[in-house]
C-alpha cells in the first residue's frame, strides 16, 4: 500500500512542477525625462515583446503612473498606481512602457514583468 501512495504523490508532484515550469516571463522598461525647454523630453527603454498572450505579474517603480502602448500607438492600459496594472492581460505583440512624470519630479522609470 505504501509504494502505491508514494508513486501517486510523486506523479502529482511531477505534474505540478511541469505545469509551473512552462510559464516564462519577460520584463520591459520605460524611462522618461522632461526637459526645461517646453515640450521636449527624452524617452528610452526595452520594449515588451510577447510571443503569446500574457498577464502582468509585477511592476517596479511606477510611482507617478504609466501607460502601456501597443505597436499602433494605441494605449491599452493607463495606470496611476503600479498595483493597478498587476493582473492586466495583454495579447501577443509588442508594447512600449510610457511613464508619467510630474512637474516637480521630471524623471521617471518603470519596469513591467509579464508572464506568458
Image: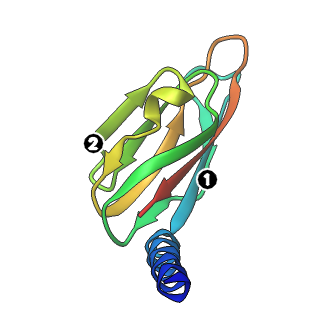
Label 2: how many Cα within 10 Å (few below 14, some 14–19, many 20+): few
**What secondary structure is found at the residue carrying circle 2?**
loop
Residue 74 percent across, percent down from the top left: 27, 42
Mark 1 vs mark 2, CA separation in Å: 18 Å
Nearer-N-terminus badge (1/2): 1
Seen at 39% across and 51% down, the residue is: 55
Camera-side residue of 74 and 6: 6
Camera-side residue of 20 and 30: 20
Return the residue found at the far front: 1
Seen at 61% across and 30% down, the residue is: 62
**What secondary structure is found at the residue carrying circle 1?**
loop
Question: Can you say whether 109 is above or below 78 in the image?
Answer: below
Tag 1 near tag 2, CB within 8 Å: no
Left or right side of 47 for 78: left
Q: Which residue is mark 1?
A: 45
Question: Can you say whether 109 is above or below 34 in the image?
Answer: below
Q: Which residue is mark 2?
A: 74
Residue 102 percent across, percent down from the top left: 62, 15
Which quadrant would the C terminus be assigned to in this image? Answer: bottom left
Seen at 68% across and 31% down, the residue is: 108
Amino acid at each position: 500500500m505504501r509504494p502505491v501512495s508514494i508513486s501517486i504523490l510523486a506523479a502529482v508532484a511531477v505534474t505540478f512542477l511541469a505545469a509551473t515550469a512552462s510559464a516564462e516571463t519577460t520584463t520591459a522598461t520605460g524611462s522618461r525625462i522632461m526637459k526645461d525647454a517646453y515640450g521636449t523630453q527624452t524617452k528610452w527603454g526595452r520594449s515588451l515583446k510577447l510571443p503569446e498572450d500574457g498577464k502582468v505579474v509585477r511592476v517596479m517603480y511606477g510611482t507617478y503612473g504609466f501607460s502601456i502602448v501597443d505597436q499602433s500607438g494605441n494605449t491599452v492600459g493607463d495606470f496611476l498606481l503600479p498595483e493597478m496594472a498587476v493582473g492586466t492581460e495583454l495579447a501577443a505583440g509588442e508594447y512600449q512602457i510610457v511613464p508619467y512624470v510630474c512637474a516637480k519630479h521630471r524623471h521617471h522609470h518603470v519596469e513591467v514583468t509579464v508572464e506568458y
